[in-house]
């Protein structure tokens, strides 16, 4: 447990989280503070905390920057642990004690790292939004709103905004965890940390381009995470089902690919 915890909190595996926080701080400074000055001057009353949260703040570039960067940010975390163990031969030594325990511990660390890389910056952004703007339930007429067609849980937006924040935090967190698992798989298959870091971004880029050409058949995880998605969204139940299958399938493939690449 101590060894696992040390790996999880090692500064080498926190680069993605730190870069994500840099993007959020930029959003707070160039987006929220500017809007707060306008709101506090009494020029308009459009801005509330939830509409200034980066997931729903579609008026600047920071939402796209953060979400499109997320595959790379999550791949810079603890997803690299197994790849580096394979490269160094350290994995052959560790699995002599327990292959099952080694994989379970490191996959939990990798998935959790991806989740936190997505969730922690978003939580900071929302805390700052509450600091600068009224944390009230939006009014459909007066305040900036959400897109009724391309927003999950739209009714919650105008009734219980805190619940829709939890919903999108969960979506982003699980997506980040999946990015991390895909990074683990690509690292195991290639034994190359650079491929492990770049493959999730490449995959998301292909899906995003595909969703532009076939919006009713191909869906980008990036657009699914946007509060006001620029593309049509699949049903939330479908997203949950596909995410569950991806997680189970990726873990199963990782297990078999890892076993085939070590020498006990």
Image (cartoon, grey):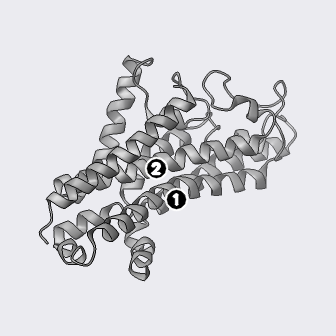
Residue 74: image location, x then y, percent: 41, 54
Q: Is residue 1 left or right of residue 264?
A: right
Tell me where residue 98 sits by quadrant: bottom left
Extreme-right residue of the structure: 42
Q: Specify the farthest residue to the left.
A: 263
**Residue 236 position by quadrant:** top right
Q: How many angstroms separate mark 2 from mark 1 (CA)?
A: 8 Å
Residue at 34 percent across and 44 percent down: it is 249
Asked if the residue under mark 1 is in contact with the one under mark 2, i.e. CB atoms within 8 Å, the reply is: yes
* Residue in the image at 39% along x and 17% along y: 214
Image quadrant in which the C terminus is located:
bottom left
Residue 39 drawn above or below residue 262: above
Describe the element under mark 2 as helix, strand or loop.
helix
**Dot 1: within a 10 Å radius of its alpha carbon, few (fewer than 14), some, or many (20 or more) residues?**
some
Q: Is residue 212 left or right of residue 228?
A: left
Relative height, residue 147 to residue 264 (above, below): above
Q: Quadrant of residue 260?
A: bottom left
Residue 196 can be seen, yes or no: no
Q: Which residue is mark 1?
A: 116
Instruction: For the N terminus, give its image quadrant.
Output: bottom left
Left or right of 51: which side holds 243? left
Res. 176 mark: 2
Q: Secondary structure at mark 1?
A: helix
- Sooner in the amino-acid sequence: mark 2 or mark 1: 1
Q: Position of residue 104 (x, y in %)?
A: 37, 64
Residue located at (77% from left, 52% from top): 130
Q: Residues within 10 Å of mark 2 (few under 14, many from 20)?
A: many
- Residue 261 locus on image (x, y percent): 14, 60
Q: From this viewpoint, is residue 252 visible?
A: yes
Q: Is residue 181 left or right of residue 36?
A: left
Give the label on residue 169, or none: none
């Amino acid at each position: 447990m101590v060894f696992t915890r040390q790996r999880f909190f090692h500064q080498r595996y926190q680069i993605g989280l730190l870069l994500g926080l840099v993007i959020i701080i930029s959003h707070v400074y160039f987006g929220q503070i500017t809007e707060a000055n306008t709101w506090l001057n009494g020029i308009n009353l459009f801005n509330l905390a939830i509409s200034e949260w980066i997931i729903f703040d579609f008026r600047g570039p920071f939402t796209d920057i953060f979400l499109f960067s997320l595959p790379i940010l999550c791949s810079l975390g603890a997803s690299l642990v197994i790849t580096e163990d394979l490269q160094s031969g350290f994995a052959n030594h560790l699995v002599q004690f327990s292959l099952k325990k080694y994989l379970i511990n490191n996959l939990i660390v990798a998935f959790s790292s991806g989740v936190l890389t997505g969730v922690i910056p978003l939580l900071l952004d929302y805390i700052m939004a509450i600091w600068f703007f009224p944390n009230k339930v939006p009014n459909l007429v007066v305040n900036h709103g959400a897109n009724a067609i391309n927003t999950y849980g739209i009714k919650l937006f105008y009734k219980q905004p805190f619940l829709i924040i939890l919903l999108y935090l969960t979506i982003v967190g699980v997506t980040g965890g999946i990015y991390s698992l895909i990074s683990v798989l690509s690292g195991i298959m290639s034994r190359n940390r650079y491929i492990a870091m770049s493959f999730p971004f490449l995959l998301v880029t292909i899906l995003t381009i595909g969703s532009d050409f076939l919006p009713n058949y191909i869906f980008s995880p990036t657009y699914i995470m946007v509060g006001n998605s620029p593309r049509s969204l699949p049903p939330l139940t479908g997203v949950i089902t596909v995410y569950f299958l991806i997680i189970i399938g990726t873990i199963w493939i990782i297990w078999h690919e890892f076993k085939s690449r070590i020498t006990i």
